[in-house]
Image (cartoon, rainbow, N blue to C red):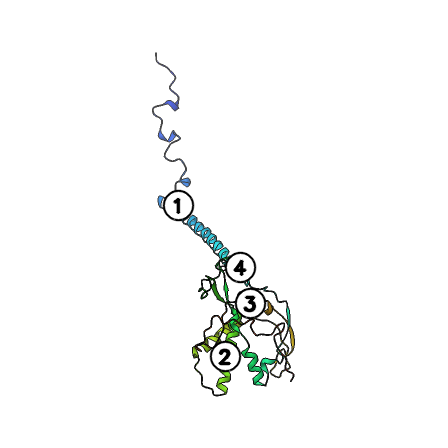
Amino acid sequence: MEDDDPLPDRYSTDSKPTDSLLESNFPPPEFEELPRSSKNSLSNATRCLWMFISILLLTVLFEGLYITYLLRQIKHLKSHLISSKHTAERTVHSPSIYTSLNETESNQAWDAILPGLGVVAVEEEYATAHNLPDTVEMPGGDGKLLYVIEAYHAIHCVKILRSHYLALRADTPWEWSHGHDMHCFDTLRQYIMCNPDDTLLYTTGHRDAGHGQKKICRDWDALRDWAESHNSGYFDTEPGSGVNNWGIYHKGDGLPMGSLLGWIVVT
């Protein structure tokens, strides 16, 4: 029996492709996909951005670790012998036995200075605990390690340079090393720059500064006591003098106690 009603259009075999939701013009042209080259460029840019962020984060992490390491090293390098605080009141730049016009007296005072006390011996455990650099062992010291207190090294240089200056003034023959004197001059320069003292000294305008002025210093007496308790028995002499430097113990360093001036000379 023939059906008079035709099939609905949606079932019609004559339906055109344009009637389908999957027709070729969907989505509209304005929503067409980007070209493949544009998609690849976007993907590469994203990867580069993440790579940059990762490198930046790693750099920050490593810098943080390195700064932490440096801070620990600086902590170990800080003075550990005596307090870094300035607690000792001293008079500076006044006449003293070291500047006496009587050269016999002044020479005796300078000759009495014993910088060798600054060559100290410590146990290996002490050196490890304070992160000290490698050094040599004390001769016959049962494994103790030798170190030189820098302040005493500077005193050694001052004493040597003074004696050489007086020898030159007196036209006395000498056999010391020119290189050692140059070393001492530069050692003192570096020592001063590494320990800058910003005390403001008054002046009268007559080539003087701070004459008799009071200032607060670190306690040299405390440093002497520490060095004494770790003495190595080293005796400091003129380089090349041929004197045996070891096993010649002299108590103290020959410098004034409780003062920078020693016996004050009235002028």
Q: Amino acid at mark 1?
A: Ser
- Distance from disc 2 to disc 3, alpha carbons, whole Å, reads 25 Å
Please tell me the numbered disc located at residue 75: 4
Quarter in which the N terminus is drawn: top left
- Distance from disc 1 to disc 2, alpha carbons, whole Å, reads 73 Å
Q: Residues within 10 Å of mark 4 (few under 14, many from 20)?
A: few
From the top left corner, tell me how far across and down residue 138 is, in percent. 46, 65
Q: Are marks 2 and 3 in contact (CB under 8 Å)?
A: no
* Comparing labels 4 and 3, the label whose residue is closer to the camera: 3
- Left or right, 131 with respect to 41, comes to right
Which one is in front, 25 or 167?
167
Q: Name the secondary structure under disc 3.
A: helix
Upstream in sequence: badge 4 or badge 3: 4
Q: Name the secondary structure under disc 2.
A: helix
Residue designated by label 3: 228
- Distance from disc 4 to disc 2, alpha carbons, whole Å, reads 34 Å
Q: Residues within 10 Å of mark 1 (few under 14, many from 20)?
A: few
